[in-house]
Amino acid sequence: MIPIPAFSDNYLWLMVQGHQAVAVDPGDAAPVLAYLQQHNLTLSAILVTHHHSDHIGGVNVLLGQFNCPVYAPHNPVFDFPYQTVVEADEITLFGTTFKVLNVPGHTAIHVAYYGGNSLFCGDTLFGCGCGRIFDGSAEQLYVSLQKIAQLPDDTLVYCAHEYTLNNIRFALSVDPDNTALQARQQTDQKLRDQGLPTLPSTLKLEKATNPFLRCDTAALQEIANSSDKLTVFRMTRELKNNF
Ligand SMILES: [Zn+2]
């Protein structure tokens, strides 16, 4: 997978095989086109997770250059032709079958794509964090993250933003004694110092360090003064909003 940096902190992920590429959430066409031209690639499909402009802004321009299918969840705001995907649909790309997971919460309409050992999760799960709640709900996002947590530990998590270091700082404020989290801060700081992405991460690492997947831990439950996981999740999301 190739991360194409875009805007201030997005990664537009590109899957490449031979002279073909698949773009995930191409929010901006220009850097994708530049990469494709530079590497003599054609675009064979586009995957869309949700409707935010930094995820779809480049779709129409790319479709003007390449005649390829776009896969996206049904959403009346999309102004490009696409094939609607729903939970459990399967799409085969470069010989790998990707399964569609319905993961609302960040937005009410949001899917992820899971195949091989890779997860394209849009703005649902971030390195050591999760998406803000826009038109979805905290309960939806909690359920979606729990669904993602059921995937195998070695799943590579391809998030759409480089938010990891800031998320780690927040995570340490609510889960300070977590040694896996402390170690992650060192590792990811080094990567960023070298100008490298902190992504993909693994689901194993997220489960060990990401507070939004750790609503059953004592540190978070003490702060929330509750052992109810959804209550802990809501509180953690609120604290992060104000961090
Ligand atoms: Zn978004």
Image (cartoon, helix red, strand yellow):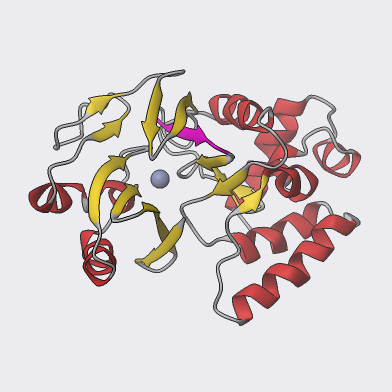
Q: Residue at x 67, y 52 (%)?
A: 128
Q: Quadrant of the rendered structure where residue 211 is?
A: top right
Task: Provide the residue span drawn in magenta.
Answer: 109-116
**Location of ligand 1 given as a quarter of the image:** top left
Q: Does the magenta segment cover residue 144?
A: no
From the viewer's side, name the closer residue of 172 and 116.
116
What secondary structure is the magenta-colored segment mainly? strand
Q: Does the magenta segment cover residue 114?
A: yes
Q: Position of residue 238 (x, y in %)?
A: 63, 44
Q: Residue at x 28, y 56 (%)?
A: 19
Task: Please say if 7 is above or below 135.
Answer: below
Relative placement, left or right, of 71 versus 194 is: left
Q: Position of residue 197 (x, y in %)?
A: 55, 67
Q: Quadrant of the rendered structure where residue 189 is?
A: bottom right
From the viewer's side, name the closer residue of 97 and 160.
97
Q: Residue 109: tell me if it is visible.
A: no
Task: Please say if 106 is above or below 41.
Answer: above
Q: Position of residue 71 (x, y in %)?
A: 29, 32
